[in-house]
Structure formats: structure tokens, C-alpha cells
Image (cartoon, grey):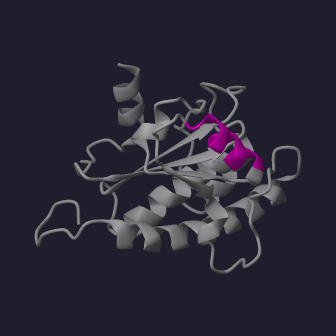
Amino acid sequence: MRRLRDLLRKAPAGEAVAPDALRVLMVCMGNICRSPIAEGVLRAKLQQAGLHGRVVVDSAGTHGYHSGEAPDPRAIRVAAQRGIDLAKLRARPVQSDDFSRFHWLLAMDEANRSWLHSRRPEGAEPRIGLLMEHATRHPGVREVPDPYYGAAAGFEHVLDLVEDACEGLVARLSAELPASPPGDRYA
């Protein structure tokens, strides 16, 4: 029951999901700053690219400190200024079945990527990597810094990095999606 509720929570009302949809999980430590920003940005970029419904996006934290909480108000505010609504998202921890449900688990930093690798169940084969590996305008930046203890400007910087990486990720996901037949409602 919880799994279905989680999937429904992440799919916008009335949006159909393709049976062969790719699934991407954005991961940070507490799931209240970086990963919900990444979830919201990727959803918006997929919508712009006409790929909504063909890629399912969620976010989670490696630690359950903030389970059930909304994103940090600063994250909600800076995202809203760019037309992205994070207010309905709620933090949750990474769960063992995430390793089989998602094709991609993208961490915001090396510590969380290492945590994912150490918890991957035997036989699970999601791609675990860093979100910034997909960035094009920020060469050499490997991690999305945690803005939690800083000023609002840190959230702006996170949003800039995440937007860049999500643009590259959309191009990658688009190339991986099976071709849609003409008239397909997911295309």
C-alpha cells in the first residue's frame, strides 16, 4: 500500500505514466534541500521536453531526520521564484526497494553516493552516480553543496547547478527512452 501511495504522491494529478517509463531518484542527506530541488527541476525540464509521463522522478534522503517534512522554506522560495513548486513534496528516507524500482539513483555529493553504493542490495542494478556528472555549464563541479547551514544565496547557487545538470540529464534520458509510436500519448 505504501509503495503505491508513494508513486501516486509523485505523479501529478491526472498524469499518465508510460509502462516502460524510466525512474530517477534524486538523493541527498535529509531530503529537504538539494534532492527536492533536483526533483522539482527535473520534473519541470521533462515537462518542457515533452517527456513527462515517460520519466518518473522522486527524491529521498540517506538519513530519515526529516521524514514527512516539507522542503526547507528557503528551497521552496527560490524554486518558486523560477516557477517550480516544491511545497507539496515530503521528505522520506531511501528504502531498500528503491534500488529495484529506480533505474537511476543520483546523489548530490560523494558522501551520499558512497552511502548508496554501500547499501545497494546484491543483485540490484540501478545506475548510481552524481547528478553533476550531467552538467555542461559547470565543468569540474562534481557535487551540489549542501546549503542548509548557509544563507539564501546558497540555495540560488544550488538551483543554478541543478538546472544545468538536469538539462544534461534530460538529454541523456531522452536518448535512452524507447522510440514512441506516432500519436503516442506519452510523447
- Write the residue at 72% across / 77% down: 138
Residue 73 position, x and y percent, is 71, 41
The residue nearer to you, when weighing 22 against 151, is 22
- The answer to whether one can see residue 60 in this image is yes
- Write the residue at 52% across / 37% down: 88
- Residue 114 falls within the magenta-colored stretch: yes
The residue nearer to you, when weighing 91 against 70, is 91
Residue 130 position, x and y percent, is 65, 59
**Left or right: 154 in relation to 166:** right
Question: Where, by quadrant of the figure, is residue 174 drawn?
Answer: bottom left
Image quadrant where one finds the C terminus: bottom left
Residue at the extreme right of the image, as rendered: 150
Image quadrant where one finds the N terminus: top left
Residue at the extreme front of the image, as rendered: 122
Residue at the extreme top of the image, as rendered: 1
Q: Which residues are magenta?
A: 111-120
- Write the residue at 22% across / 70% down: 179
Looking at the image, residue 139 lies above or below residue 159: below
Residue 160 position, x and y percent, is 69, 68
- The answer to whether one can see residue 32 in this image is no
